[in-house]
Image: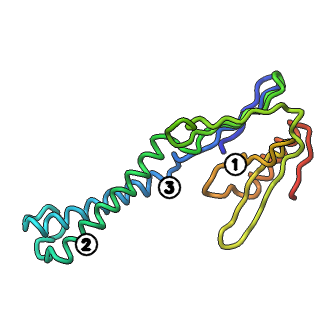
Amino acid sequence: MTPSTQSADNLILRREVLGARRVSNYWWAIVISLGASGFLLSGISSYLKVNLLPFADPTQLLFIPQGIVMGFYGCLGLLIALYLWLIILWDVGGGYNEFNKQTDRVNIFRWGFPGKNRRIEICHGLEDVQAVRIDIREGFNPRRILYLRVKGRGEIPLTRVGQPLPLAELENQGAELARFLQVPLEGL
């Protein structure tokens, strides 16, 4: 999440949530696109016996089986890259968390995949908020998530998916939100 913004009169707390437009997703989309293009061009070069790559000579490869396998890996890689570019374009998972004391509303908004449920919006009254909870699990696959516990709804995750937030930042955000909403902070 990006730093929170509060209005001048401290009645609105809004936090932007970073979705698929992370640097790591751009990096992997570029790397996979370039690598898959190289594999596909190698497969085509081995079939046509024309060198399409300036840094290698794939015309020496036999089309069956090496050229077909290279072409298959290239096509598969380009499909994965296309998926990454599309989720970046659609900003899947991006949105905001807004806590508004003027309207007594909590508004959690995220972008999803295209379709009838692309806009994911959860609205509740501030009086329904019971607590802010921090879930920390360390180990091979660490998990650090900030939840909002709401009556009749359960727990709503507030942090981004993917890279876990640093522990100090997560604790600060949780404490700031609990103070703003005047509810207990659980899980520490």
Name the residue tied to disc 3. 24
Q: Which residue is mark 1?
A: 159
Horizontal side of 147 relative to 34 (left or right) equals right
The numbered mark, 3 or 1, whose residue comes first in the sequence reads 3
Q: Which residue is mark 2?
A: 69
Q: Give the number of the mark in front: 3 or 1.
A: 1
Left or right of residue 95, residue 35 in this image: left
Q: CA distance from mark 2 to mark 1?
A: 41 Å
The crowding category of the residue bearing disc 2, from other C-alpha atoms within 10 Å (few below 14, some 14 to 19, many at least 20), is: some
**Does residue 169 appear left or right of residue 149 in this picture?**
left
Question: Can you say whether 157 is above or below 180 in the image?
Answer: below
Q: Is residue 37 visible?
A: yes
Image point (59%, 35%), residue name: 119
> Percent position (x, y) of residue 17?
64, 42
Circle 1 Cα neighbour tier, 10 Å, few/some/many (<14 / 14–19 / ≥20)? many
Element marked by disc 1: loop
Nearer the camera: disc 3 or disc 2 = 2
* Foreground pick, 137 / 169: 137
